[in-house]
Amino acid sequence: MGYQIVLVEWIDSRMSLEPWEHEDCAKELALSRCTSVGFLLYKDKNKTVLVTSYGEGSVQGTLAIPTRTIKSLKVVR
């Protein structure tokens, strides 16, 4: 069974690396815009699961993305 190769653009949390910072600076901390490419193993309303490799009933490099954070999902192949 083959899986679709997809490109996913999604939003993730970000943590400041500053030990102490002014409140105004903390309020301006931007979310992370992420891009991931992989084989689409599974997708439902809660999560989208990509893998980097698959074969003989096994997968490797699993990434679970909260579906609600996905901005776009495009089939590459």
Image (cartoon, rainbow, N blue to C red):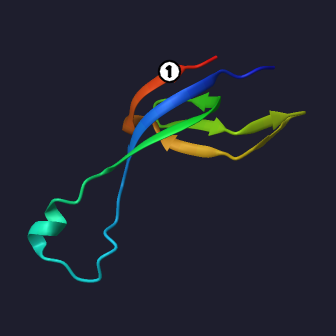
Image coordinates for residue 33, horizontal then vertical, percent: 37, 44
Image point (31%, 69%), residue name: 16
For disc 1, the marked residue is 74
Q: Quadrant of residue 3?
A: top right
Please, is residue 44 above or below residue 31 in the view? above
On the image, the x and y values in percent for residue 29 come to: 22, 60
- Left or right: 18 in relation to 67: left
Helix, strand or loop at disc 1? strand
Task: Give the quarter of the image for residue 13.
Answer: bottom left
Q: Residue at coordinates 60% horizontally, 37% vertically from top-left?
A: 49
Q: Position of residue 27 (x, y in %)?
A: 15, 62
| Residue 39 found in image quarter | top right
Decide if residue 34 is on the left or right side of residue 28.
right
71 in relation to 52, above or below: above
Q: What x and y, as percent, mark residue 72?
A: 41, 26
* 12 or 43: nearer the viewer: 12
Callout 1 amino acid: Lys
The residue located at (18%, 67%) in the rendering is 26
Relative to 57, say whether 21 is above or below: below
Is the N terminus in the top left, top right, bottom left or bottom right quadrant? Answer: top right
Quadrant (top left, top right, bottom left, bottom right) of the C terminus = top right
